[in-house]
């Protein structure tokens, strides 16, 4: 939490110098709404005017809003930045992300201190009956149906990676 606060102080200082509210965007899912609101409230408590623009859309839409100057920042996952925005192969640390984002005039701050990995859920009794304990076990059961979001289906770190 201390790292989040330090990063917000830096952001707040820049916004205060501009005398305009810090415009915080968020994507269209619960966790992003909450993170966007936390960022906006932390900036306000640091003395900076801030407004939260919640639920702008998926990654592409929110990043386009950032590029267009409609928002000043938004919470994003480092893996999403690497795979979906920058199209990098493999993992990328903050230094690599900042190098890749710099030509576009963007950067990333400190990590917020948690991990958000994809997971698949299945009823325990069904998994036991089919002998499913891992992702590779699913390959033996093509009759199973998955419920996936449209974004997950098209993301490099979503369905294409899982299907491979």
Image (spheres, grey):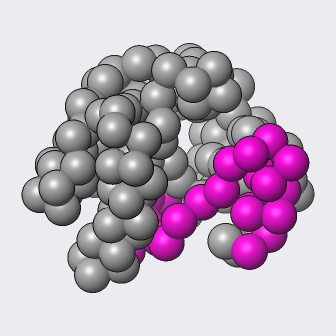
User: Closer to the camera, 134 or 62?
Assistant: 62
Residue at the bottom extreme, as displayed: 2
Q: Compare residues 94 and 119 and report the one nearer the observer.
A: 94
- What's the residue at 80%, 42% (across, down)? 104
User: Which quadrant holds residue 151?
Assistant: top right
The residue lying toward the viewer, choosing from 37 and 17, is 17
Query: Residue reaching furthest left?
Result: 45
Task: Find residue 20 and report its image quarter.
Answer: top left
> How far across and down, in percent of the image, does residue 21 sit?
30, 34
Q: Tell me if I can see residue 112 in this picture.
A: no
Give coordinates of residue 40: x percent, y percent.
Answer: 23, 44
Magenta extent: 95-119
How many marks can you see?
Answer: 0
Relative horizontal placement of residue 75, taking residue 9 as reference (left or right): right
Q: Main secondary structure of the magenta part?
A: loop
Find residue 27 and report its horizontal and vertical position in percent. 41, 29
116 up-or-down from 70: above or below: below
Q: Decide if residue 9 is in sight here.
A: yes
| 35 lies left or right of 161 | left
* Residue drawn where x is 48% and y is 58% of the image: 117
**Residue drawn at x 66%, y 28% as measured from the top left:** 67
């Amino acid at each position: 939490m201390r790292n989040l606060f330090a990063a917000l102080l830096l952001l707040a200082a820049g916004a205060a110098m501009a005398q305009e509210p810090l415009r915080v965007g968020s994507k269209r899912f619960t966790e992003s709404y909450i993170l966007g609101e936390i960022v906006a409230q932390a900036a306000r408590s640091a003395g900076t005017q801030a407004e939260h623009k919640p639920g702008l859309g998926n990654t592409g839409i929110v990043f386009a809003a950032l590029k267009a100057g409609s928002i000043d920042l938004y919470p994003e996952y480092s893996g999403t930045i690497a795979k979906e925005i920058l199209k990098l192969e493999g993992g990328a640390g903050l230094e690599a992300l900042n190098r890749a984002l710099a030509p576009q005039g963007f950067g990333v701050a400190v990590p917020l201190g948690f991990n958000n990995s994809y997971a698949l859920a299945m009823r325990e009794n069904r998994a036991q009956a089919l002998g499913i304990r891992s992702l590779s076990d699913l390959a033996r059961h093509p009759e199973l149906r998955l419920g996936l979001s449209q974004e997950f289906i098209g993301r490099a770190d979503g369905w294409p990676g899982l299907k491979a």
